[in-house]
Amino acid sequence: MNTFQEEAKSCKDLLALYKKQARPSRPERLLFTGVGENDVYNITAPFEDQGEKVIAGRVESRDSESSRVFFFVEKGDGTWASRDGAPSFELQDPFFTRIKGDLIIGGVQTFPHPTVDHALMWRTVFYKGASIETLELFFSGPDGMKDLRIVELADGSIGVFTRPQGEKGGRGKIGYTRISSLQDLSIEVIEEAPLFMGQFNDDEWGGANELHLLEDGKIGVLGHIACFDADNGKHYYPMSFIFNPNDQSCSPIKIIAERSDFLPGVAKQEDLIDVVFSGGLVRESDGTAVFYAGISDAEAHRIVIRDPFL
């Protein structure tokens, strides 16, 4: 695929560019009830379901990787409460979209590794329904692939963003293909999707988290770019770029926030302190966007940023 970006910029270089820009404002920590002592993090942006504003979030004990996705509704005191009667799913890192009017909820499903003892494998799975209460599993992605996303394009076809790792994608690179309908979504189609070039250095990685169909038919991609430091600590930065499905071109990646833009908080582990998980964007009419994020694998925050797709 072609790209407007001639060569990949490192996390360090992109962060230096970001620090020259206007900084986000109005940082907030989201508070959740109905989950006991568990943490809620890696949330979606709010979306509407049956007349209510809903957030999906990863619910997990601080000392565990055993996760469920819950659905939360906002209460009058500003907290988000577990929605009465809503299902929960044994998944990590939820996301949502709408295809042909149906609500699509996805997440990462973990399961015992088929060849390595005491290890886990993962895949991205998708549920579909008219509402949260009617969601049913309709597709499971390739084993070992996170950050698989779909979006309805302006002509009614479906854009598919992939993130293979290993021989094809290294530590993780973004690919893309287009299908006519959800019935055409398959493991083979996903695995054969070409990769974007010039987005990530081989010792870094990234993926798409949320997709926005823009007024001109292009796709605004909210994602992440990540790297390790010399002490094996992880650094995850929210990023964005714009993809043109007509000529298969991408604008350059840009970092849109960093951990210090948010309120101080706790971390699941010391090596996860500098992790910002791109949850979702709510684009406003004044040129700003409310950015929802998971913080340090332990909390959920939001800030106001410049709309990255303008």
Image: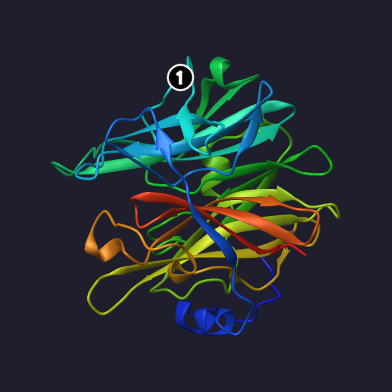
**Left or right position of 190 against 124:** right
Question: Residue 15, relative to residue 34: is it above or below?
Answer: below
Which quarter shows the N terminus?
A: bottom right
Could you tell me if residue 20 is visible in this image? yes
**Left or right position of 4 against 206:** right
> Picture coordinates of residue 90 (x, y %)?
36, 29
**Left or right position of 173 against 271:** right
Q: Which residue is mark 1?
A: 87
Quick one: label 1, few (<14), some, or many (20+) residues within 10 Å? few
Give the amino acid at mark 1: Pro
- The image's colour scheme reads rainbow
Q: Which residue is at 54% across, 68% downward?
A: 257
> Picture coordinates of residue 270 (x, y %)?
23, 64
Question: Residue 45, relative to residue 169: is it above or below?
Answer: above
Q: Nearer the viewer, residue 87 or 241?
A: 87
Q: Nearer the viewer, residue 299 or 158?
A: 299
> Picture coordinates of residue 230 (x, y %)?
26, 80
